[in-house]
Image (cartoon, helix red, strand yellow):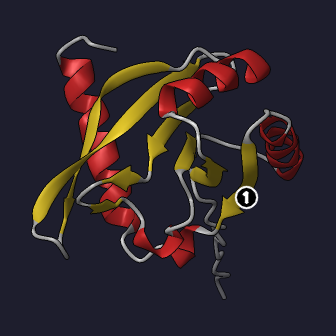
Amino acid sequence: MSKKLRLNVEYKPEYVIFGVSCHKKDYWIAFHLNNVLNFNFTRIDDFIFNSQKKKEAISFPLFYFEDKEKLNTYYFISNYNPKGKLISAYKQTDYFLFINGLFNTQQKESLIKTIKSIKNVLTVFEINLLSIKNIDDILSDLELHILKLNKKNKL
């Protein structure tokens, strides 16, 4: 009698998202994130999200940093545009920090603590990916945006 082997694959999301509330301008907080986290966020072309609800494309300021040592990519995106919010479920959140790569609990806690130490940052919290209805659309549009910029050699 032959035995069947079963492979149990545990899905781990490749993205971690943090919400940041701060009433300062995007370039101000990106500058301070660079200082306290030793990042090198640079402003790139605005992220254009094609909202299915609003039937129009809305642009959001976007900052990009790739950590080649840890193999993580960071996107700092504003949640505000006069035409609407990027993620309307988080209306009180001013910015999102998307991290593409592996990130353990200790790293998350350290990152939150460090960002909270920035003056004028009101709060930082991790967002459950499952709580965002259109997260797949946002992430796919974000990845396409980065691919287009790489193709144009802007990154």
Q: Quadrant of the N terminus?
A: bottom right
State the residue lying farthest toward the left.
55
Q: Residue at x 27, y 55 (%)?
A: 82
Where does residue 66 sit, x and y in percent of width and height?
A: 53, 22
Where does residue 67 sit, x and y in percent of width and height?
A: 61, 20
Left or right: where 83 falls relative to 33: left
Which is more toward the observer, 13 or 129? 129
* Quarter of the figure with residue 51: bottom left
Where does residue 54 sit, x and y in percent of width and height?
A: 16, 71
Does dot 1 land on a helix, a strand or a loop?
strand
Q: Residue at x 63, y 69 (%)?
A: 128
Pointer 1: residues within 10 angstroms few (<14), some, or many (20+)? Answer: many
74 over 86 or under it: above or below: above
Which is more toward the observer, 114 or 109? 114
Q: Quadrant of the C terminus?
A: top left
89 over 127 or under it: above or below: below
154 over 26 or under it: above or below: above
The residue indicated by pointer 1 is 125
Which is more toward the observer, 30 or 49? 30
Q: Label 1 sits on what residue type? A: Phe
Q: Residue at x 33, y 45 (%)?
A: 142
Q: How many marks?
A: 1
State the residue lying farthest toward the top.
153
* Quarter of the figure with residue 83: bottom left
Q: Residue at x 64, y 52 (%)?
A: 21
Left or right: where 106 falls relative to 149: right
State the residue lying farthest toward the bottom.
1
* Quarter of the figure with residue 46: top left
